[in-house]
Amino acid sequence: MAKEKDNYLENEEDSRRTLRIILTIWWTMILGGERMKWVLVILSGFFIFGYSEARGEDWKLFSRSEGSSFFFDAEGVSSRSENLYRVWVKVEISEKDRSAWVQKGGQKYLDLSYIKSLMEIDCKDKTERSLSLELFSEQKTLDSFKSEDPQWNPISPGSSWNNLHKAVCEQRSTL
């Protein structure tokens, strides 16, 4: 069991790079959107968040980077087709990553505790994409975003997303 966890924690530097890419994409969406669009996105986030909390969650660690920890909801993995799965990812934010959010987005992120993102993983093509992003303090939702047309990204060997790909796709192939 300990060796399995170690396999998911192989590359901390890549995990930080991946987190920075996700944050950059979502900041681009935040700064370029129209107000009404974001109202709809936030309302959608409340609906999605409410659903995920109601069904229960089973967070499994798949990567770490300088204090931030990456988990996926093993209980909530759902099949979209034979090789396509949706999975919630949760990132518990380190102090360093929180500081970066405050620098980019302002004081409202001072209490940022964790981020949740609804991801799709294509096991056959070994690609991933983020469908939504939610930012939380311990007490409340700080922000919520949904991508209109998310792009598929290749999963690099040795990356944190490769760890997620292995966990989701291997878990599903044994069922």
Image (spheres, grey):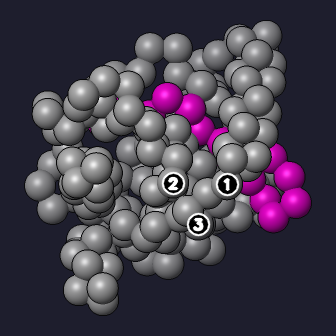
Question: Which of the 4 image quadrants contains residue 157?
Answer: bottom left
- Of marks 1 and 2, which one's residue comes earlier in the chain? 1
Callouts 1 and 2 close, C-beta under 8 Å: yes
Q: Residue at x 88, y 60 (%)?
A: 139
Viewer-side label of 3, 1:
1
Left of 50 or right of it: where is 168? left
Three-letter amino acid code of the residue under disc 3: Glu
Three-letter amino acid code of the residue under disc 1: Gly
Segment colored magenta: 128-141
According to the picture, the residue beneath numbered tag 3 turns out to be: 92
Callouts 2 and 3 close, C-beta under 8 Å: no
- Relative height, residue 152 to residue 62 (above, below): above
Tell me the distance, in whole angstroms, between the alpha carbons under discs 3 and 1: 18 Å
| Magenta stretch holds residue 136 | yes
Q: Residue at x 67, y 54 (%)?
A: 56
According to the picture, the residue beneath numbered tag 1 turns out to be: 56
- Of marks 2 and 3, which one's residue comes earlier in the chain? 2
The picture places residue 88, in percent across and down from the top left corner, at: 52, 46
- Of marks 3 and 1, which one's residue comes earlier in the chain? 1
According to the picture, the residue beneath numbered tag 2 turns out to be: 75
Q: Residue at x 51, y 54 (%)?
A: 75
The picture places residue 30, in percent across and down from the top left corner, at: 63, 28
Three-letter amino acid code of the residue under disc 2: Glu
